[in-house]
Amino acid sequence: MSALQELQQALQTVSDQLEQTQRHLATSRTALHQAESALRGVDPDNPETVVPPGLHRADDQIEHTLSTVEQVADTIRQFAAGL
């Protein structure tokens, strides 16, 4: 196997792992939204008393991480296509 083929194989492995990471993050975000909805249902008149304030920050962090992973995946795809 040539060095180029090894590099392409390594890039594919990284791309596969990044896709898996994106799926996990999307699943986590969905679960977070479901948890927030369930917590709001505990006291619909006063959801601020049962929904932790950090929950929205966690969602923002997941969104930021998803965006970063997507950018990295795009960069790797572009690099691999240029080989």
Image: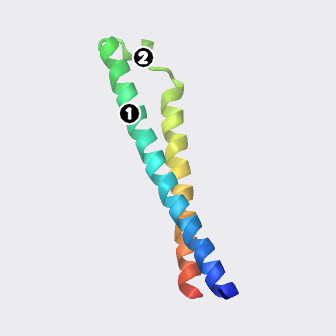
What amino acid is labelled 1 in the image? His
Disc on res. 33: 1
Rendered location of residue 40, percent (x, y): 34, 19
Category of crowding for the residue at label 2, using alpha-carbon neighbours closer than 10 angstroms: few (below 14), some (14–19), many (at least 20): few
10 to the left or right of 33: right
Category of crowding for the residue at label 1, using alpha-carbon neighbours closer than 10 angstroms: few (below 14), some (14–19), many (at least 20): some
The color scheme shown is rainbow
Quadrant into which the N terminus falls: bottom right
Rendered location of residue 62, percent (x, y): 51, 43
Looking at the image, which is closer to me, 53 or 79? Answer: 79
Looking at the image, which is closer to me, 33 or 24? Answer: 24
Residue 31 in which image quadrant: top left
Disc on res. 9: none
Residue ID for mark 2: 48
Rendered location of residue 77, percent (x, y): 53, 75
**What residue occupies the far right of the structure in this picture?**
3
Number of numbered callouts drawn: 2
3 to the left or right of 30: right
